[in-house]
Image (tube, coloured by chain):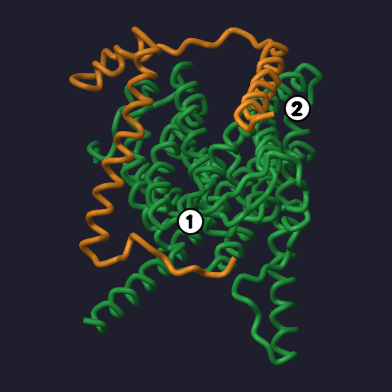
Chain colours: A orange, B green
Amino acid sequence: MPVVKRLALILATLWLTAQTALAAGGGGELIVIVADSRKLTGIMAWWANLYNESHLYFMLLTVVLIPLIGVIFGVIADFIMHFIGIDLSSRELAEH
Amino acid sequence: MDWLYVLMPIAGVKIFWPGLIILGIGVGVIGGFFGMGGAWMVTPGLNILGFPMAFAIGTDIAHMAGKSLISTMRHGKFGNVDYKLGCIMIVGTVAGFEVGAQMIMWLEKLGAVDRVVRWLYLVLLALIAWMVFADVAKRLRKEREAKMAGKELDKLATGLEWHKTFHKIKIPPMVHLKTAGIYCSAWLPIGVSFFTGWLAGILGIGGGLIRMPALIYLVGCPTHVAVGTDLFEVMISGLYGAGTYTYKGRTELVAAIIMLVGASVGAQIGSVATKYIKGYGIRIAFGLAVVGCFVSVLLKLIPVYYPAVNQICDVSATVLILGLVTALSIYITVKMVQGAQREVAAKKAKV
C-alpha cells in the first residue's frame, strides 16, 4: 500500500475514533454569561457588545488576534535581542 | 491607585493589571524553558487576582497559545523544533484528548470522578519525577564509572535509554525525523501522542507536563528538541482550545493580552536560557517543578479526607505553586543573563 494511502487510513481511523467517542458523550446545557457593557466606553464597550451579539465573531477575532499579537511581540523581542548582541540563529549542541 | 486596576469587559471584575503582567512573565519563563503551557501554575494565580473560575481556564489557554507561538518562533530559530514530528503527534494528541475528555464525562456519570482524577494525576507526577531523577542518577553513575576507567563519557550519553527499545519496533511506515535525529516507526510518535493526549484529556490539562518527558524517554528526542517540539504542539492545541473556549464565551481577551505582554518577555528569556543551560540542567529543573506540582496536588487531595484542614492546605498549595514559579523564574533568568553576558563578552573579545 502506498505511504499516502496508509497515512490517509491512519488519519481516518484516528478521526473516527475521536468521533465515536464524541458521539458517546452527553452533556448538559451551557450557562450563558452576558457581558455588562453599561459601565464600559470606547473599544471595551464595542468588545463587550460583540461578545453579547455573536460568540462566533468574538471567537474568530480572538483566534486571529492572539497569534497576531504573539508574532508582533516576538518580532519586537527579536529586534531587542539582536540589539543587545545575542546570537539567535544558532546554539551549540549540548548533551542529549 | 485606581489606575492600577482594569475592568474586564466580559467577566465584569476589576483586576490588578501589574499582577497579570508579573504572572505572565513567570509562566512565560517557565513555559519557554520547559516546553509546556503551565496551566497548573496560571489557574491558581488568576484566582488570586480575582478571576472567576469560569474565565480562568479560557483566558489561560488563550494567552498560552500566543506565548507558545513566541517560544516556538525562538526555538525554531535555534533548530529545536522538529516540525515533522510535531505534525505527526498532533493527530494522536487530538484523538487521544477527545477520547480522554469523553471518558471523563462517562466517569462523571459513575460519580467520584474528581478523586479518581486527582489520584491518577498524583501517580503520574510521581512516575515522571522518578523517571527524571532515575535518569539523572544513572547518567551520574555512568560518568563516575567512565572516570574510574580513565575515559570521558560521551557528551550525548543518557541515563535511561528506553527509547532504544522502542526504536527496534519496525512496523511500517518508518519515518526519519531529521531534527530529532530519530529513525523509527511512525506508530511510535502516534502511539505516544495518543497516550499523552488521552492522559491530558482525562486530567483536564494541556499535556506539556506529560509530553515533554514522553518525547525524551519514549520517543528519544534530545532535551532541547523535546522542549521546542512540545511548544509547537502546545501552540496548536492552545489555539484550538482558545477557539472552543471563546466560542463558549469563557475567554477574557483583554486579560490574555495583558498577560501576553509579560509572557512575551518571559517566553524569550525562557527560550534563550535553553541556549546556555545543558540538557541535563533542564531535566533536573523540570524534575523539581514536577515535585512541586506533586506536593500541590497532594495538598488539594488531603482536605477530601480531612475537611478541617481545607483552608490551610489551600493556602499552602497556592503559596507553594507561586513560590515555585518565582524561584524557577529567577533561576532561569539569572542563568540566561549570565550566559548572554558571556556570549557578548566573547564576541567583543573576538573583535
Q: Where is residue A56 in the image (x, y as percent from the top left)?
A: 39, 12
- Dividing the picture into quadrants, the one containing residue B281 is bottom right
C-alpha gap between disc 2 and disc 1 = 32 Å
Q: Is residue B312 visible?
A: no
Snapshot quadrant of residue B122: top right
Nearer-N-terminus badge (2/1)? 1
Residue B39: x and y in percent read: 53, 40
Front position in the image: A79 or B48: A79
Q: Residue at x 43, y 63 (%)?
A: B273
Q: Which residue is drawn at 79% across and 38% down?
A: B305
Spot the residue most to the left.
A42
Q: Is residue B233 left or right of residue B272?
A: right
**B345 versus B327 height, above or below:** below
Nearest to viewer (mark 2 / mark 1): 1
Q: Residue B113 carries which label?
A: 2
Query: Which amino acid type is marked by label 1?
Result: Phe
Counting labels gives: 2
Q: In which quarter of the image is residue B311?
A: top right
Quarter containing the N terminus of chain B: top left
Same chain under badges 2 and 1? The reply is yes
- Counting from the top left corner in percent of width and height, residue B38 is at 52, 44
Judging by the rendered image, the residue that carries numbered circle 1 is: B33
Local crowd size for mark 1, using a 10 Å CA cut-off: few (<14), some (14–19), many (≥20) = many
* Circles 2, 1 touching at the beta carbon (< 8 Å): no
Residue type (three-letter) at the residue carrying disc 2: Val
Q: From what the image shows, is residue B149 above or below residue A39?
A: below
Report the chain holding disc 2. B
